[in-house]
Image (cartoon, helix red, strand yellow):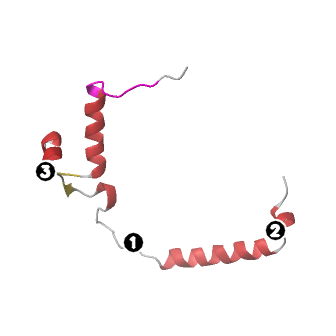
Amino acid sequence: MASSARVFGNSCRTLMAAAKSSAAATAAAAKPKTAGRVTGILKVQPVSPALAKFLGSPEASRSGAVKKIWEYVKSHNLQVQISIL
């Protein structure tokens, strides 16, 4: 395996050093803006009436809804198994 010095010359080391120092400075300066706030797929949101009836709750997180749907699919043997010869 060729070393990075032979492939990229000495400029690779310069680029790597610059990237490391700027990444460290950015990480030190960045503060978490959402400390204590739930966002993304974990955020509980209102769901449609049909999904609320299925889940038994008018609100659910995306990951929670997907978990309950997969529980239903597996418990009622609705997952199709494809076998390749």
Place of residue 27 in the rendered image (x, y in percent of width and height, measured from the top left): 52, 74
Question: What range is drawn magenta here?
Answer: 75-82
Above or below, 46 relative to 37: above
Label 2, label 3: how far apart the Cα atoms are:
57 Å
The residue tagged 3 is 58
Asked if the residues shown at circle 3 and circle 1 are in contact, with their CB atoms under 8 angstroms apart, the answer is no
Above or below, 11 relative to 37: below
The residue tagged 1 is 32
Q: Residue at x 79, y 75 (%)?
A: 11
Q: Residues within 10 Å of mark 2 (few under 14, many from 20)?
A: few
| Disc number placed over residue 1 in the picture, else none | none
Q: Nearer the viewer, residue 2 or 20?
A: 2
Q: Which numbered mark, 3 or 1, is in the foreground of this view?
A: 3
Q: Which numbered mark, 1 or 2, is in the foreground of this view?
A: 2
Residue 82 in the figure: left or right of residue 38: right
Q: Quadrant of residue 21?
A: bottom right
Q: Residue at x 22, y 56 (%)?
A: 44
The residue tagged 2 is 8
Label 1, label 2: how far apart the Cα atoms are:
36 Å
| Magenta span main SS | loop
Q: Give, as a three-letter code, the residue at label 3.
A: Pro
Query: Element at badge 3?
Result: loop
Q: Nearer the viewer, residue 69 or 42?
A: 69
Q: Residue at x 16, y 51 (%)?
A: 48
